[in-house]
């Protein structure tokens, strides 16, 4: 029955100018949460132990670059072949579609730093790789994004595997930032 009122409208999307600062606050809180979680367990030393890994700066950066390019390429291939992945990307584009290249880079960097510190260092240190991967995949999906669960799980396994292999947090964060940036650029920019 109609009471003369128009139907409720969906909430307006976040203005592109506000998206990156909001993301920085969210991922900054994630970084602070990781630090606090490690501190409460007396494990802050894990940040420095894992920073460059066992093989040094150049190996960590190179491993991160290679893994990031691999992840971005795999996602691009999946998006071309799997309609459900294309649909997820269309939903992502609806949220970040107004961002320009520098903003996409900023978003990729803040998300990589926050998520890698929280999931790959704090959560993985507490629960191990399989549980950290499962939690990351579960939190990266939701209604309309169920097809994203295997993608999130694969990315989490790849990034967490870099830590397990001794490549370090720099490698995981670099891989995450590169994969996110290249994927967002492909999705959003012509």
Image: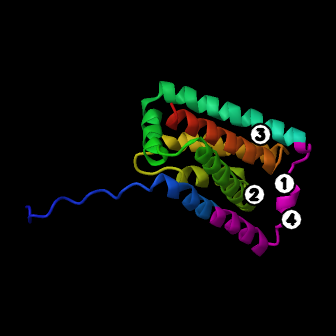
Characterize the local packing of mark 1: few (<14), some (14-19) or many (20 or more) Cα atoms within 10 angstroms.
some
Residue highlighted by disc 3 = 64
Residue highlighted by disc 4 = 45
Residue 146 badge: none
- SS assignment at label 2: helix
Q: Which numbered disc flags the more N-terminal residue, 4 or 1?
A: 4
77 or 4: which is nearer to us? 4
Taking the spot 79% from the left edge, 44% from the top edge, the residue there is 171
Is residue 44 in view from this perspective?
yes
What secondary structure is the stretch in magenta mostly built from? Answer: helix
Q: Position of residue 42 (x, y in %)?
A: 82, 72
Label 3 or label 4, whichever lies nearer to me, is 3
Taking the spot 51% from the left edge, 55% from the top edge, the residue there is 17
Mark 3 and mark 2 in contact (Cβ < 8 Å)? no
Mark 1 and mark 2 in contact (Cβ < 8 Å)? yes
Q: Which residues are magenta?
A: 28-57
Residue sitting farthest toward the right: 55
- SS assignment at label 3: helix
Is residue 146 in view from this perspective?
no
Residue highlighted by disc 2 = 121
Taking the spot 63% from the left edge, 53% from the top edge, the residue there is 111
Mark 2 and mark 4 in contact (Cβ < 8 Å)? no
Q: Which numbered disc flags the more N-terminal residue, 3 or 4?
A: 4
Q: How many marks?
A: 4
Characterize the local packing of mark 4: few (<14), some (14-19) or many (20 or more) Cα atoms within 10 angstroms.
few
Mark 1 and mark 4 in contact (Cβ < 8 Å)? no
């Amino acid at each position: 029955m109609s009471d003369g009122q128009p139907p409720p409208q969906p909430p307006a999307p976040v203005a592109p100018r506000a998206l990156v600062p909001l993301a920085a606050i969210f991922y900054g809180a994630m970084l602070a949460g990781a630090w606090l979680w490690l501190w409460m367990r007396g494990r802050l030393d894990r940040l420095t132990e894992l920073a460059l890994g066992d093989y040094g700066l150049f190996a960590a950066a190179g491993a991160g670059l290679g893994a990031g390019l691999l992840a971005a390429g795999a996602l691009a291939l999946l998006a071309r072949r799997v309609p459900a992945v294309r649909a997820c990307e269309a939903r992502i584009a609806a949220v970040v579609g107004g961002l320009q290249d520098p903003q996409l880079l900023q978003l990729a960097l803040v998300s990589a730093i926050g998520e890698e510190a929280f999931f790959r260092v704090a959560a993985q240190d507490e629960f191990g790789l399989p549980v950290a991967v499962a939690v990351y995949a579960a939190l990266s999906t939701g209604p309309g994004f169920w097809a994203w669960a295997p993608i999130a799980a694969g990315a989490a396994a790849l990034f967490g595997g870099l830590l397990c292999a001794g490549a370090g947090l720099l490698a995981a964060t670099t891989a995450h930032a590169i994969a996110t940036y290249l994927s967002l650029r492909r999705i959003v920019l012509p």
